[in-house]
Image (cartoon, rainbow, N blue to C red):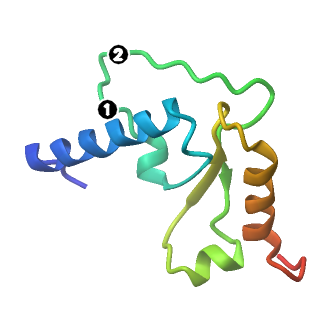
Amino acid sequence: MRFTNALWTIITAIFLVALAAIDDEQLDVVLMDKDAFDLQLDPSLSYISVTKEYPMGLNFSEVKRIKQAGFNGDIYVGILANSPRMETALSYLKYLFYGESGEK
């Protein structure tokens, strides 16, 4: 995808809103495609991710609920490290993965 100045402005605005939600502990789970997962807004800056022993994101592309939602390509899901609702966020990921019946 070729990014125009207008598109970069929109991406930056969305990124800033997401950062504010993360800082305010209002965002618990993120879903993103491969481009968003790999996106680095400013290549001149270095970014550090604190993930302990956990992966940065799980590929949920083959999960039935993700496919039914109309997502195309690789879809990554992650729980933010500063979420005050870790158990609820984990329950949501289990729901996405297994559904109510426990089936993948």
In the image, which disc is placed on residue 101?
Answer: none
Instruction: From the top left corner, tell me how far across and down residue 65 is, in percent.
Output: 66, 78
**Cβ–Cβ under 8 Å for marks 2 and 1:** yes
Query: Quadrant of the image for the C terminus?
Result: bottom right
| Pointer 1 residue | 41
* Mark 2: few/some/many CA within 10 Å (<14, 14-19, 20+): few
Per the image, label 2 sits on a secondary structure element best described as: loop
Left or right placement of residue 13 versus residue 25 in this view: left
According to the picture, the residue beneath numbered tag 2 turns out to be 45
Q: Nearer the viewer, residue 90 or 68?
A: 90
* Amino acid at pointer 1: Leu
Q: Nearer the viewer, residue 6 or 44?
A: 6
Question: At x 59% / y 54%, what residue is drawn?
Answer: 76
Q: Position of residue 15 (x, y in %)?
A: 35, 40
Quadrant location of the N terminus in the rendered image: bottom left
- Image-based side of 42 in relation to 102, left or right: left
Q: Residue at x 65, y 22 (%)?
A: 50
